[in-house]
């Protein structure tokens, strides 16, 4: 699979001035939703991640909302296991809602669209562990943050795209007066 071709074909790799959910700024952004809007790409990407789980015990896939829902579902479909997701409440805390309860599953895989700082993935891991679930796998379509592992889990991704990030005080796009765009969904305080 040529993921670079899919990123280009779907316009999923954006260039500009972006405010990331981490609070950092970047000159590029991966908008996986632009790839995942096409069921044939979502299917192939889900299979690619599922294939990386060979040798891992997984009886359920969990993902954070919003970005992880489509790819998590596709991975679960290829593994023929259930899929659930967690989402942020009004205070920004990751919770299982909508009646989802991971406690009946013992071996969970966490699947994301993009990992940058690993914050959402870590929140999902910590949340699932409060239900006494064992996380056996962590994966994503893209790793843009150069992370190799979160806690004791090696991160498996289809593509590593280490993109430049900047502290807002040292951001060359801010210094040049470029307008900033916040494309993600996580709320945070600047």
Image: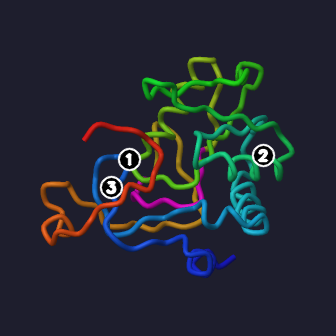
- Determine the CA span between mark 1 and mark 3: 7 Å
Q: Position of residue 186 (x, y in %)?
A: 44, 42
Whole-percent x and y of residue 179?
27, 65
**Which span is picked out in magenta?**
138-147
Distance Cα–Cα, label 2 vs label 1: 26 Å
> Callout 2: helix, strand or loop?
helix
Q: Is residue 5 above or below residue 101?
A: below
Identified at 28% across, 37% down, the residue is 189
Tell me, for residue 76, which label it has, or none.
2
Closest to the observer, 185 or 47: 185
Question: Which mark, residue 19?
Answer: 3
- Alpha carbon separation for disc pair 2 and 3: 31 Å
Residue 142 lies in the magenta stretch:
yes
Q: Which mark is residue 21?
A: 1
Q: Is residue 38 above or below residue 105?
A: below
Which tag, 2 or 1, sits closer to the chain's start?
1
């Amino acid at each position: 699979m040529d993921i670079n071709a899919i990123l280009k074909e779907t316009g999923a790799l954006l260039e500009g001035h972006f405010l990331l959910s981490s609070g950092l700024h970047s000159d590029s952004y991966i908008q996986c939703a632009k790839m995942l809007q096409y069921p044939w790409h979502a299917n192939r990407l889900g299979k690619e991640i599922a294939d990386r789980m060979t040798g891992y015990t997984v009886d359920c896939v969990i993902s954070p909302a919003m970005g992880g829902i489509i790819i998590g579902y596709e991975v679960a479909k290829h593994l023929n296991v259930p899929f659930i997701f967690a989402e942020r409440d009004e205070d920004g805390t990751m919770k299982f809602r909508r009646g989802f309860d991971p406690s009946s599953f013992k071996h969970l895989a966490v699947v994301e669209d993009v990992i940058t700082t690993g914050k959402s993935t870590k929140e999902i891991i910590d949340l699932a562990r409060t239900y006494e679930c064992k996380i056996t796998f962590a994966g994503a379509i893209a790793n843009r943050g150069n992370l190799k592992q979160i806690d004791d889990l090696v991160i498996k991704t289809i593509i590593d795209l280490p993109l430049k990030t900047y502290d807002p005080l040292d951001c060359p796009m801010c210094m040049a007066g470029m307008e900033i765009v916040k494309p993600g969904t996580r709320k945070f305080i600047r």
